[in-house]
Image (tube, rainbow, N blue to C red):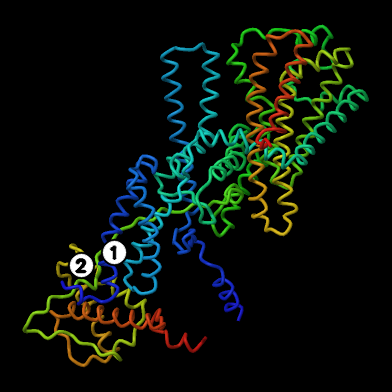
Amino acid sequence: MDSQDLIRSARFRKEREADWQRLETLVRAAESKGLQRMAFADARDLAELYRQSTTSLAIAREISLDKALLTYLEALTARAYLCVYAPQERLGGLFGRFLKRGAPEAMRRSWKFILLGFLFMTLGALAGYLLYFENNDWFYVFMPSEMASGRSPNATTDSLRASIYGHDSGTSGLGSFAAYLFSHNTRIAIFVFGLGVFACAPAILLTFYNGLILGAFFALHVDRGLGVDLAGWLSVHGVTELSAVCIACGGGLKLGSAVLFPGNRTRADALRHAGRDAVKLALVAALMLVAAALLESFARQLVQDMTSRFVIGWGVGALWLAWFAFGGRRLR
Amino acid sequence: MIDRFRKGRKDKRPSPDILMPPEGVPLTLPIAGVGVRTAAQFTDIVLTSIAAISLLILLSTLDLASPQSMAAIAVLVFFSIGVPYYVLAELAWNGQTLGKRIMKIKVVAHDGGSLSAHSIVLRNLMKEAEIFLPGMLLLTLGTASPLEATASLVWIAIALLVPLCDRYRRRLGDMMAGTHVIHLPVPILLKDMAVEKPEVETDRKSFVFLSHQLDHYGAFELQTLESLLRARNTPAATAANPQTDAAIATIVEKIRKKIGYAAPVPPQDRLRFLQAFYNAQREHLEQRRLFGDRRDNKHYAQTDKDI
């Protein structure tokens, strides 16, 4: 049929139809293979044809009443849009950037919240410590029985010492690694972060409670003259692990404070903004928990000397601090 | 009055299905509902658990590790089908996990930009806190501790209520990450009805419509007629069917009466008449549109007065 006979919108369609069909095949290829594996010319054409199809869509909405054409162009442009604006970073690059810049910068930006996390933990520990000396029975109130594993005010001093300087028998390194990774503190860290959204309170309470346990446990050993030994025993992994809980708490507080005090933004907007740093804090906490589990399962059983326990624990802590303080700063 | 007020308020906000890409041409991407997303989630859980269990069975039959290490490996495998699986799958497949691919839904950035790795990590971390953790608690606690079980039930209920109350059906994690989930549109190009000009045989006169005869209908009626003609052109419908023939006869008579088309249309020419009317009407309406006169439906005259 002669194109002059056609009405205007049909001519419009006829002129561009081949391009749209090419775009459709390119979109299908991009969806099945991924943009990275497409030929250079194809990827270039995809972007170009996508932009052409957006203008086609804008024009068609104005001049055409052909419903089939409009729905087709809508769908095609939307599919092409999803391909063109797909994330184009490689996983390795993502991890590298997170470790080098993203994580330490987020830590520095939210130091106040992390400090609050440490504060609540310390307050809890102090309260637990003082309450234990007031009355030994507080220990049973705070301590979940499965965590104490026999280390209670009833235990003898010798058995307490043995559990500090003893070998766990019967578990392989990897087995105990997994056991520690999914132990009490990991669950606490997840809860503390996730619950922070609900207006901070659950995160604060949980961190405080964790501190209470720690304080009471410590007081028990101080009572028996084992305070320094326990500090060494805890330092190996505790510096890393408890910091991780505090950092997770900082992330949760950041989210919670966005809900409580959104400022000039809407609450959803404030949450989104706070989420950028909070998620990095959560990932840092996860990383630290894995490191703590490694330390706990291997280093603590291998190193029996108290001073080297202190050195390892606080040395690793200093390394973390150095990463947070100096990572990603530009050299001048 | 109240009705009108409510209507006015509703109309002011853009439809949730509209997404604005950086090019500035709004695209229609229909929001995926809670049902289809739950289905995708269940599909994911089933598929990943099957994969994990078969992997573990394979490892244990190969007898490579001691029982204690096996337990550790099992814990690690089950850990990795949680958040890590969802994050890596959505990164690799541009916002789709296996379940989402099967259900043909997809995560997009709420502001129309590209989906960042940060958003994907955040929305899936929150999935752990929102769904998996209380879900696991609910399953493991059972009836032993009714208080905690109720608490986790309430928790799940709140997590499910949030998307139901949101226009974009976003979870808490979606809100934080700035994402929402859409149905993938399927582009199918149907042929242009206006190109399908009926072959005019020499002995029959072609239908001619005058300008005032085309002033009765708007875009909605035109597109309804388009759907009718398309349905007639499918292979299944071409075989003569007395019922559809009767319907077409009624439609032709209605149109003739409305536009005041005097000459009668013989039965064998009815489809040809509709086709010709479609072409003429579309050309006329598109012409009016170019001059800034949009006629959305046949009541266009009244709505103009209202404004």
In the figure, is residue A144 to the left or right of B155? Answer: right
Classify the position of the N terminus of chain B by image quarter.
Answer: bottom right
Image position, residue A30 (x, y; %):
36, 46
Q: Give the amino acid type for the residue marked by disc 1 in the picture.
A: Arg
Q: Nearer the viewer, mark 2 or mark 1?
A: 1
Viewer-side residue, A167 vs B282: B282
- Which structural element holds mark 1? helix
Mark drawn on residue A16: 1
Image position, residue A146 (x, y; %):
71, 21
- Which structural element holds mark 2? helix
To which quarter of the image does residue B153 belong? top right
Q: Is residue A4 above or below residue B112?
A: below
Viewer-side residue, B208 vs B160: B208
Total marks in image: 2
Q: CA distance from mark 2 to mark 1?
A: 24 Å
For mark 1, name the chain: A
As drawn, which residue projects farthest toward the right? A134
Same chain for mark 2 and mark 1? The answer is no
Q: Give the amino acid type for the residue marked by disc 2 in the picture.
A: Asn
**Residue at image location 56% in from the left, 75% down from the top:** B7
Q: Is residue B182 above or below residue B50?
A: below
To which quarter of the image does residue A169 belong? top right
As drawn, which residue projects farthest toward the left? B203
Mark drawn on residue B233: 2
